[in-house]
Image: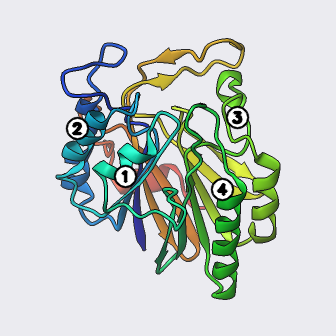
Amino acid sequence: MFKLIHLTDPHFVPPGETLYGRDPSNPLAAAVADINENHADADLVVVTGDLTHWGEAEAFRHLQRTLAPLAPPLRLLIGNHDDRSRFAAAFPGQPRDADGFVQSALRTGEGRMLFLDTVLEGTDAGWYCETRLAWLGDQLDQAAAKDEDVFLFMHHPPFDVGVAPMDRIGLIQRDAFRAVVEPHRARIRHLFFGHLHRPIFGTWRGIGLSTIRALNHQVALDFSTDGHAPGCFEPPAYAICLIEADQLVIHVHDFLDESPRFSLDDSPVDDWANAYPAA
């Protein structure tokens, strides 16, 4: 089994500053501590972009210091709020492709994980140019040649989700992206993404997909607002993904939840068996 931890959209600012009245470093530091305590055995932690809010060098350095105690291996994606060159300066160990994009492949016992760079600086919408499409196509062809399953990670989703302000800033090259993915979709087991600050699960072109709540702030569930993206402070979360050859299970963990724990086993097992006999 491959255990994957998925976090997204920490939106860091420089130390001492706040975003929407909150310090984004607090929930991420709590998530790191929770992962170290409960999931130090994870094979990989992935953060799917918008690492910072304004892309300042000091915000990236602050993020690096906050992530430093994390026990499992780490892979970072960038999002539309990030600066690619400042990210590279703060995280020189994070791989990039031959063209300098923050994308890479990781071969695991469960398949090939592909980490994509969907950023065009100067726009909030997702952008996946011909150079990056060619890289993706080559990686998918390599996976096919080796009969490997594939897991995709990206910031911007290549489809609409029904929240109009966010759908307008999804991936622009949706048709081109779909054309590259289509011949391999039976091989692609899951697509993990960020950007939307919502817990969303489903399928696209028959491919399972998921994203989770962000770390500092969320996009409110609103199918009618068409102007600005409505924000809220639903609690942050991370996902624990348990990947095996014949199944993929995702648990969403509200790691700041402090509600009391109690036993649900108020009746002996035999009583339940008597009350609900097997058919």
The disc, 2 or 1, on the residue closer to the chain's N-terminal end is: 2
* Disc 1 element: helix
What residue does disc 3 label? 161
Amino acid type, residue under disc 4 in the picture: Gly
Instruction: Describe the element under mark 2 as helix, strand or loop.
Output: helix
Mark 2 or 4, nearer chain start: 2
Q: Amino acid at mark 1?
A: Ala
Residue 275: numbered disc: none
Label 2 Cα crowd, 10 Å radius (few <14 / some 14-19 / many 20+): some
Q: Is residue 138 visible?
A: yes
Q: Which residue is mark 1?
A: 88
Circles 4 and 3: CB atoms closer than 8 Å: no
Instruction: Please count the marks in the image.
Output: 4
Asked if labels 2 and 3 touch by Cβ distance under 8 angstroms, the answer is no
Disc 3 is placed on an element classified as loop
Name the one closer to the observer, 5 or 278.
5
